[in-house]
Amino acid sequence: MTNSNMTAGKRLTSALVATALSVSVVAGVGVVLHKLSADPNGTIVATKEADTITINGKVYPKASLTMGVYADKEQAKADGFTGNKNDWVQFGPSNHLVLPANTYVTMTIHAYDGGEKLNNPFFGKVVGTVGGTMSVDGIDVSSIPADQVQHTFTIHGLPSTSQDPLFVNIPLQHVNADENDEFLPTKDPNTNFKGHTMVFSFLTKSAGEYVWNCEYPCGDGTYAKFGAAMSAYGYMSGKVTVTA
Amino acid sequence: MTTLDQHVGTRPIPNPKKSLITKLNAGTGLIVGIIFALLTYRGLSTVLDISVYELNNRVLLATMFMWSIGFLAGIGAFIGPIRWLIGEDLTAEEQLYMAGDGQGIKRYFKYCTDHKVVGIQYLWGVIVLLAVGGAMAMMIRTDLANPGGHFITPSVYNSLVGLHGITMIIALIIVATGPFGNYIMPIMIGAADMAFPRLNALSWWVLFTAIPVLCSAWFLGGIPTGWTAYAPLSVQAGPGMNAFIATIIIFAISTAVSGANITATVITMRAKGMTWNRVPIFVVGATLSVAMAIPAFPTFMLAMIMTAMDRSFLTGFFDANVGGTGWLYAHLFWIMGHPEVYVILLPGVAILIEIVPVFVRKPLFSYTSAIVGFAGIVGLSFLVWAHHMYMSGWMPMLNGPFMVTTEMISVPTGLIFLVILGTLWNGKPWLKVPMLGVYAFLWNMLVGGITGLYLSDVPADMYLHGSMYVTAHFHYTLMGAALTGAVAGLSYWYPKMTGHMLHERASYISFWLVQIGFQVLYLGMFIAGAEGQPRRVVDYAEQFATSNKISTMGAYTIGIGFIVLLWAVIHSWRHGKIAPMNPWGAKTLEWTVPYPVPLVNFDTPPVVTSDPYGYGRSAK
Amino acid sequence: MSEHDSVDLKPTPGDRLANFYKRSDVIQSTIFGVIVTGIFVILGGKFYTKWMPTVMSTDMKAIERLMVVFTWIAAPVCGVVLGVALYTFLNRHSGDTQPPDGPATRTNGPIVLLWSVVTSLLALTAVVYGITELNSSSIASAKNAEDAMVVNVTGSQWVWTFEYPKLGVTSHELMLPINHPVTFHVNSVDVNHSFWPVQLGVKVDANKVAETTAETTPNKLGEFDVKCAELCGLYHAYMETTGEVMTVDDFNNWVVAQGGHSA
């Protein structure tokens, strides 16, 4: 058994070095986790527009944003979005939306997937938009039957003293199976297949952090169909940052 | 480290040359395990389509179990039983070889049957698990330092919460019975080894195979369920859940093996004269703890097998759509879950009760009360599980009865306090590091116990259930009491296990950093819970910001405290002050053997004539 | 407890008791104990009322009172434990050598008995108090059940929705009229959730198929939080919404604005 006569100074140094080393290892793991947790496709920032709109006597600037929702990676690629890692149903081109505060935001969602039935019929309702409606391929509606939805785009957040509540629910009209024989999406009305386009507007309030997710059960093969793509961050879920 | 086994000089190192066991070690185990796993995965994935949810689960589960079996085959775990089956039992020389006699550091990487080697293996296993679990806790607290959830995504956070939970639960279950139950306890009762030395090696190496399986959860997408793994969320979860299921099943086997072994050892192998009223209290606590685990863990294993069936064969045990129910899972889980917290608590408390008389130089006050207290806790712990289910809606009528049994646990727990206080009274405690742990325990267990009183009460639990308050409460009992006990045990028995004293100043610094950080961390968390913050959330509203910030500062302090302790353990292992045979002047048998402890512990079997608490000026 | 001076004198029990009270360790421990008890009594009165959110129902009021009373029940226990612990901690032996041996007290029957009886009584007090609370709240809810407004609460991964079946309204926010009993019928469409309107002091799990119920009567106007208290997957943390207790008129206006028919 070696019984070294380590001096007190050497011992202190070794202790300090070991502590610093361990702390940096843990911190390093933290940095790696943080890096891995970054939004895989960056953010999509709403484009501010020059004109304004007056609602209930208050003037709002306008901004707009376009997203797509795809049955798989191949559809996403055909629409110009490289897609997430797994070949799952997904929103694109990013899952992190950045919106300006106190603005009239108009969102366009091109949706190319089929669908069956919502778990909770509530999400067939349009909630939180200006006028309580959205347009599906140009026709205004305030709800979609629970068995004609392909996905939903649902913004919600934590009730908090520091931010205004924001709740928006948009059901996305599904694509009928017989419309679906030409697989890849296109926005050209002359081709065989196109998805549906939902356009809606809502008002943001002060700055805050919210999340959005899909409420249509599209994690096929899992319990309540809410596993897989539904439970992996970044496919059918994401963040909404409202910036001042 | 170099071990000078004193028998090396007097006895030739056994060398059964032709025997297979001389060629096997953890390395061959690793190779065979990986080969088994790869073959299973490649083979099954050619016949089963792994893009299908339930088929993928089958393939992954089979791969994990085959890894475990392959590793055990590769390290030679099955040689003994097979040789026995074919009628050619191991020779005496081979058995001696398996005990690792004179093999130095190599024996720590072999299927070694010496209980002292197994104890050290467990010790390092526990240290690694605690370090990993602790690092995860730091990640959790970093995320919660500020509202907004910007540090990591919810999926990573949920995985962290679940894997921190299960890593720490496994670590704490073995933290006292693993290292000290294996290394110290047989010596304490005057035995030459455990009753079943090969099972002893098996329990460690089976547990060892669970560690890579648990880690693989990260590479399979993590787990979203927390360590409670409630169904149907666990049925919905991704492939990472298989790693959790396999870990629990493997761990339950290890626990059963080790529980049977420890129980049998204590019942049959006590020294001559060590009647039941002379057994050291740590032995009683550890034995009751593993005896409690023997019926408790199989229900968890069963719950996991059913979850695996639901996931792999779509059986629907827990699926209400086809007639199953999630309540079934909750019952199976908590029938394990509540005894399990006492499985963790008892050995830690028993260590502290063992320590008190030594450092106060007084007999243990009311040995009988300690035994009655332990027995009462063990008995009641099987009758309280549904207090975790007050709000589940399962059967509100039974909330009252479960509330009664739960609150009655405070009576045997009170006896434990009485034993410690009675021993302290009229004494002048010698405040070495182990003794400090006793004081930390008194405070932490008091807070843990009182907050447990609120939680056991149905109307109060209506508010507190599922909040941060619960998290703070059980950390007070599991970490503040049980882990504190185990750390005290480490500094108490370190001299016997390594031949060196644990660096004293570093242990003091670590103790105070950990304990002060602990109070700060969980004070913040109690406040957050009272304010209404749910547990297991990646993000929270602005109004909880202050209490969470306090908690995170406390957590970092604890982290640094444990790093200092880790340094002390590693440093002192070789460079610590050489320990005298009995540095604390204790009267239990482990202090009568020299370091290194001889292979069979005692040259002549000891004879016991009194209990080991005969301290004091005038023995009555 | 005074064996160390009882060897030759053999005093009567009365003398022993009298001497016991005069011992400095007894006096100091008692002082510490009284201080600790006092701290816990004050803490019990202040801690929960300070940190717990606004009380908006009698259930929440009962919970808050219960937390306070339980702390008071526990206070003397803390006093005894920490009083003795503090005294011995301060009266420690320092140095690198063992302290001298203390008196060889093995046990003390009356003390063990007294301790067991007192802790049992305290536990019993807590049990009786808790059962009484439980009972009175279930009697109250049974009484209110007939004229209660029913709200169907649905937990979906990761949003709460509320349906008022008699009013023809569905909403993502929970609006309630003041002083009107309400019965929540709680369900889940997927995994387990736990429905927790924080300031109303009720909580019950949302399970698939097996419906659970909870009752309360909000008695204070204002906003409250609705949270999920059971880990339910990815966005468990965000499964929160707001609710509001309104005057009956405001509530009826809200119902009409949502397209329902007022009660």
Image (cartoon, grey):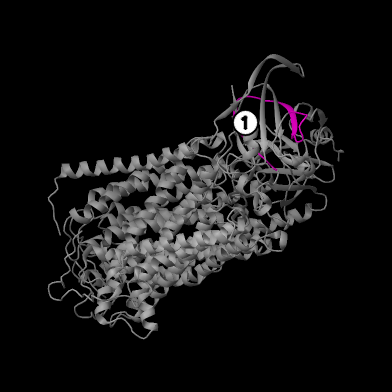
Front residue of this view, candidates C193 and B283: C193
Q: Is residue C107 above or below residue B320?
A: below
Residue closest to the far top:
A50
In the figure, is residue A110 to the left or right of B612? right
Residue A201 lies in the magenta stretch: yes
Residue assigned mark 1: A80
Q: Is residue A57 above or below residue B549?
A: above
Magenta residues? Answer: A188-215
Residue for point 73% across, 39% down: A182
> Residue B114 occupies which quadrant of the picture?
bottom left
For label 1, the crowd category at 10 Å Cα-Cα, with few meaning under 14, some 14 to 19 and many 20 or more, is: few
Q: Residue at x 80, y 27 (%)?
A: A138
Image position, residue B371 (x, y; %)? 40, 72
Looking at the picture, tell me which residue is in the foreground, A108 or B430.
A108
Chain identity of mark 1: A
Q: Is residue C201 magenta?
A: no
The answer to which of B161 and B220 lies nearer the viewer is B220
Residue B275 visible in the snapshot = yes
Looking at numbered disc 1 in the image, what kind of residue is underneath it? Gly
Give the image location of residue C156, x and y in percent.
69, 47
